[in-house]
Amino acid sequence: SQQGEEDPQALSIQEGENATMNCSYKTSINNLQWYRQNSGRGLVHLILIRSNEREKHSGRLRVTLDTSKKSSSLLITASRAADTASYFCAAGTNSGGYQKVTFGTGTKLQVIP
Amino acid sequence: SQTIHQWPATLVQPVGSPLSLECTVEGTSNPNLYWYRQAAGRGLQLLFYSVGIGQISSEVPQNLSASRPQDRQFILSSKKLLLSDSGFYLCAWSVFSLRRDFYGYTFGSGTRLTVV
């Protein structure tokens, strides 16, 4: 079963507005990652937040993590048309010599110019 | 800098034909390597991962197999493709997390496989 589930499944906003996407997961994790995927392309890593962190920033991105609620949110401020893409959260847990990472089904973001 | 190459970008294959997708990583050593499949409009399903040469772990029993003949080369294969093997296949790498901090995956550009 999917470890991460995003909400909403689709989001349409005007350029300049903020976009917020949420992710819930089921079991304890070591980290929570967010990725972006343009149509028909590979995923691009955006940001990783570790389980002992509560908030992290990278440019126009702000990620929060609430381990008590097993949830995370991704905020994109001052959105641009180029932000149009699908966004995936991914929950990471240590499993021997590698990180077991389970992806959600994604939020499709459309930014209207 | 590290780069990952995946080819081909698109592939149309008849049912019952063999498959070989290749992925290579440059600029790092002893990476963890992964094959994922993404169905249309869906999330990613982990197919195989490898923590070293010749070490392959399968997450989902299926018609596919993987091999890692060299440290930075990962190959996805099938002897006979099924219609259900159609999808978007993604290769990824990460650092080996016991030795170094994990910073997330770096993905290849993907292969769109259509089995007809």
Image (tube, coloured by chain):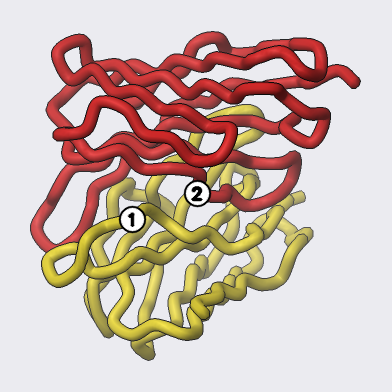
Residue B12 position, x and y percent, is 78, 59
Contact (CB < 8 A) between labels 1 and 2?
yes
Q: Tell me: B13 left or right of A95.
A: right
Residue situated furthest right in the rendering: A113
Q: Is residue B20 visible?
A: no
Q: Which residue is at 74% across, 61% downward?
A: B13
Residue at disc 1, secondary structure: loop
Residue at disc 2, secondary structure: strand
Residue B86 position, x and y percent, is 64, 47
Q: Residues within 10 Å of mark 2 (few under 14, many from 20)?
A: some
In the picture, one chain is red; tell me its letter: A
Residue sitting nearer the eye, A87 or B24? A87
Question: Which quadrant holds the N terminus of chain A?
Answer: top left
Label 1 is found on which chain of the structure? B
- For disc 1, the marked residue is B103
Q: Is residue A2 above or below residue B80?
A: above
Q: Which residue is at 38% across, 39% downward?
A: A33
Residue B45 position, x and y percent, is 43, 41
Question: Label 1 amino acid?
Answer: Tyr
Q: Tell me: A102 left or right of B11.
A: left
- For disc 2, the marked residue is A45
| Quadrant in which residue A66 is drawn | top left
Q: Colour of chain B?
A: yellow
Q: Is residue A30 visible?
A: yes
